[in-house]
Structure formats: C-alpha cells, structure tokens
C-alpha cells in the first residue's frame, strides 16, 4: 500500500465518527492518499446497517427516552450501540490496494487490530470469519466493509469496555424479560480489554498500539494529515444526508404481519427470512400473474458495491423457482456477500414465494 494519511480525531461528535469516512471515501480520486481514521464518539449513539429497516431493528422510543441519536451507515451488518469506550478505525483506500476478494480483505485488514489486542495483552485474539475478532469464543470486535464512491472501505473497533445492558436496551425486543436474557447473552459472548485484562488501558495507549500495528502490517508510516477543501465540502453534504429522515428510513419493508398479502386474485406480496452464516436475509417479493415484478433484499449481512440492487433486479422475472435460481446464478459475483451463498438467497426467495413455507421452517 502507498503512503497512508492518518486522521486521528480522538474524541469527536457522534456525527463525525460515522460521517467522516463516508465523505473521505466519496471524495477519493486517483492520486489521493489512502487514509486511516481513528475516533471515539463523545456521546453514545445507535447505528444501523445499510440494508436494515430502522423500525424493525431498533427500539426508537427507547432511544428517544435515553437521548440516543440514530444514524444509518453505508456499511452492512446489524444495529449497534456505540460509545467512547470503543476506538473505531476506518480504512479508506483505492481498490487496487485491497485484496480483490472481500473474504481475503477481511482477513488481511483484520491483522492489525488482532496484533493491537495481542500487544495490549490479549494473547488469544484472532480473526474469526466472516467478520469477527474473537478470543476464546467471545467476540471482541466487529468488522465491516463496503464500496463508497470509488473507494474500498474497511471498518472495525477495539473495545475497551462493553455495556451489554445499554446495547440490549436499544434493540427492538418486545418482551422485557427477553431483553434481560439478551443482555445476559451479550454480556457472556461479547468481551473487551477490561474483561480480558482486568483493567482498562488508557485510550492513548490503545491508539498508539493500533497505529503501530497498522504500520507494521501495511509496511508504511501513517502520516498525520488534514482534510482537503473538496473533502470538507463532501463532508457537509454527507452530514445533511446522515441527519435526514429520508436516509434513516431508506429501507422500508411491508408489515411483518403481512408475510403473504393477497392484493387481488393474481397479485400478492410475500416475505421470507433466512439465516445465513454471513447474517440474516429478508426477501420481499411482489408476484403478479406468475411473475415476480418487484423484489427487495434486506437484513444484517454485508455487501460490496451494487451486489444487492443487481441481485434484486435478477430476481425479477418468472416466479418458477428454478428460473429464479438460474437468474441469481447469472448475476452472482463471488465474495460480494461474505458468508452468503447463492442457495441462501434462493432459499429466502423460495420462502417469500410459497405461502406457509416460512411457518413450516420455524
């Protein structure tokens, strides 16, 4: 990788912590340096993945009561609670400087945070496909990737401390007893530096070790830098987008109770859900006279580039399952949806197409 600019924001606004890397990526042009951004948000907030519907994932009323802002990111994955006890790293680079396979990119860029954890004393830290950092079966960090503009983006975190109850409080869990169980489960399976070491290292030490790890992995020195004029202008546009209700509610699915809704004699809307290793898939299809006329694929998986809209377009056509499978096969790009196979997508479409199929598989 060529020279890398370092933007160490330290403590910053919640908006900046999630918006700046979008703007830097969207501004990237040939000849611009690759960039690594490090930041910790001053106040807690909630962030949902690119393919999630807000009202199905997050307890919006609870967030309002707790004064927690909500943002949507371009990177996939699930809804997460973020606070200053997590150091976020965001790599923005030219695609030529990242492995061509998304699976290899996860493994490649995970090496530095793994080395950071080990240098801080968590000797058992390792990368666990598809997109986790783990120690002895416990998650100690999440990773994500996306294409924004012309840039490849890789994001993740070093967790100094984890508040499982706060994280569970923002998820859409209708039963409070179940919320307690979710919090207990998260506490058991999500770890942190504090839990592993019995102490919380100083934030400055964590940052220094992460910078050292990235320099060692990439074989370059991270040069402190500033935003350029074009990046600042792009950042202002992204702030407006991130704060807009239109962007936050960009993904809208039919009412979950209407998994199979008959509109007229030969027109209906069907929904299916299916858990793949790479995350939860949801498919919503409209079928008219034996043809899929509209398709929407959502969930907490990761996707690169235009893979999702391309696959949605491929799903449209005759509703016979083998023909759907053939169209998905023709549009499929290897590694575009890490941890999701062609048959996972075929299965979730099958469940959406066949009334009663979802109930039968539960």
Image (cartoon, rainbow, N blue to C red):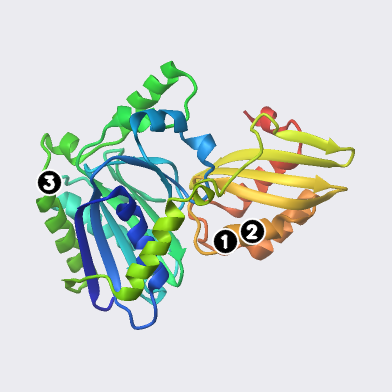
Q: Are marks 3 and 1 in contact (CB under 8 Å)?
A: no
Q: Are marks 2 and 1 in contact (CB under 8 Å)?
A: yes
Question: In terms of image quadrants, where is residue 252?
Answer: top right
- Measured as percent of width and height from the top left, residue 244 is found at 48, 50
The 10 Å Cα crowd at callout 2, few under 14, some 14 to 19, many 20 or more, is many
Q: Is residue 326 left or right of residue 231?
A: right
Provide the secondary structure element on which disc 1 rests.
helix
Provide the secondary structure element on which disc 3 rests.
loop
Q: Is residue 239 left or right of residue 16?
A: right
- In the rendered view, would you say 340 is above or below 170? below
Q: Which residue is mark 3?
A: 121
Residue 54 versus residue 164: which sits nearer the camera?
54
- In the rendered view, would you say 70 is above or below 143? above
Measure how far apart labels 3 and 1 are at the Cα level. 39 Å
- Measured as percent of width and height from the top left, residue 209 is found at 13, 56
Q: Is residue 118 left or right of residue 35?
A: left
Residue 73 in view here: no
- Measured as percent of width and height from the top left, residue 337 is found at 52, 56
Residue pictured at 11% horizontal, 52% vertical: 204
Disc number for residue 311: 2
Q: Is residue 254 left or right of residue 306?
A: right
Q: Which residue is mark 1?
A: 307
- Measured as percent of width and height from the top left, residue 45 is found at 34, 41
Residue 161 versus residue 230: which sits nearer the camera?
230
Residue pictured at 43% horizontal, 53% vertical: 242
Residue 155 in view here: yes
For the N terminus, the image quarter is: bottom left
């Amino acid at each position: 990788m060529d020279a890398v600019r370092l933007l160490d924001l330290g403590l910053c606004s919640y908006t900046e912590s999630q918006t700046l890397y979008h703007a830097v990526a969207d501004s990237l042009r040939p000849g611009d340096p690759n960039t690594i951004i490090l930041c910790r948000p001053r106040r807690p907030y909630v962030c949902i993945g690119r393919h999630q519907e807000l009202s199905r994932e997050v307890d919006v009323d609870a967030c309002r009561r707790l004064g927690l802002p909500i943002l949507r990111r371009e990177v996939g994955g699930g809804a997460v609670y973020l606070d200053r006890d997590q150091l976020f790293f965001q790599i923005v680079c030219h695609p030529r400087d990242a492995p061509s396979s998304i699976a290899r990119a996860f493994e490649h860029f995970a090496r530095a945070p793994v080395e950071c954890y080990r240098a801080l004393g968590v000797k058992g830290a390792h990368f666990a496909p598809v997109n986790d950092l783990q120690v002895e079966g416990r998650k100690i960090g999440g990773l994500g990737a996306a294409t924004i503009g012309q840039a490849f983006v890789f994001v993740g975190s070093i967790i100094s401390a984890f508040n499982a109850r706060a994280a569970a409080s923002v998820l859409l869990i209708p039963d409070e007893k179940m919320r307690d169980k979710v919090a207990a489960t998260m506490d058991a399976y999500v770890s942190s530096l504090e839990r592993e070491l019995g102490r919380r290292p100083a934030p400055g030490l964590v940052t220094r070790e992460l910078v050292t790890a990235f320099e060692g992995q990439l074989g370059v020195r991270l040069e402190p830098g500033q935003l350029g004029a074009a990046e600042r202008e792009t950042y202002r546009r992204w702030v407006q987008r991130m704060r807009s209700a239109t962007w936050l509610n960009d993904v809208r699915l039919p009412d979950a109770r209407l998994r199979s809704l008959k509109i007229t004699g030969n027109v209906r809307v069907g929904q299916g859900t299916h858990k793949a290793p790479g995350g939860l898939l949801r498919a919503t299809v409209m079928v008219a006279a034996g043809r899929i006329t509209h398709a929407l694929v959502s969930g907490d998986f990761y996707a690169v580039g235009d893979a999702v809209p391309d696959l949605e377009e491929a799903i449209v056509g005759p509703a016979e399952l083998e023909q759907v499978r053939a169209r998905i096969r023709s549009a499929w790009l290897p590694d575009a949806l890490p941890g999701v196979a062609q048959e996972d997508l075929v299965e979730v479409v099958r469940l959406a197409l066949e009334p009663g199929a979802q109930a039968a598989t539960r």
